[in-house]
Image (tube, rainbow, N blue to C red):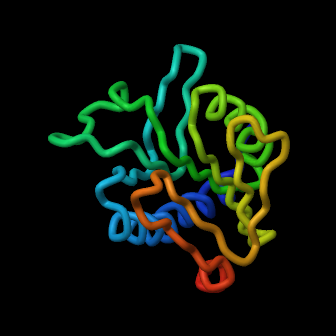
Amino acid sequence: MRCCPESRRSARRWSDCCGCDLAVRYEYATAAVGRTLLSPADIEYSPRRLVQPDLFVVPFTPGQPPREWTEVRDLLLVIEVLSPCTAHVDRHRKRRIYLEEGVPTYWIVDLDARRIECRRPGAVHPTVHEQSISWQPRTDVAPLEIDLLAFFAAQP
């Protein structure tokens, strides 16, 4: 399926603007848990399983951050932003890959519907969040709390 440039720009604008906002919130709240990264990034689980998440968190390891994308395998959180040309891939193909590869939390951001679908391994259906969403990768760290009404209201 071919993606139209306009929807690709819209999703990228979200990643650049909102993704950075989320990254700053996450880094400030739970910097000891992981590093927040934005695409472009090729995460290759195998030659036939390459994904490029819009925004993702890798576990924090003391020392130097990953120098090559080939060093990145474990993802704590993946966030994909839907666009007309990515919706099917994000909701089906990528969801299957992320969950089969052990990603514990996968968020699908639907800007038009102003909601986030949260997928977790073993769950048959997503949980849908329209008011707020939280993420707590470890119990010894305070959760990241996001007021979705305010978050979406601030989007262009």
The x and y percentages for residue 133 are: 64, 68
Looking at the image, residue 133 lies above or below residue 117? below
Classify residue 153 as left or right of residue 64.
Answer: right
Q: Residue at x 68, y 83 (%)?
A: 149
Looking at the image, residue 123 lies above or below residue 30? above
User: How many numbered marks have been drawn onto this rendered protein structure?
Assistant: 0
Q: Residue furthest left?
A: 63
Q: Residue furthest top?
A: 47
Give the position of the C terminus as an image quadrant.
Answer: bottom right
Give the position of the N terminus as an image quadrant.
Answer: top right
Q: Residue at x 84, y 46 (%)?
A: 125
The x and y percentages for residue 19 are: 49, 64
The x and y percentages for residue 82 are: 71, 55
Q: Residue at x 79, y 50 (%)?
A: 126
Residue 11: image quadrant is: bottom right
Q: Residue at x 54, y 44 (%)?
A: 53
Q: Residue furthest front?
A: 140
Residue 28: image quadrant is: bottom left
Classify residue 22 as left or right of residue 29.
Answer: right
Nearest the eye: 4 or 107? 107
Looking at the image, residue 75 lies above or below residue 112? above
Nearest the eye: 114 or 8? 114
Looking at the image, residue 41 lies above or below residue 112? above
The x and y percentages for residue 105 are: 60, 47
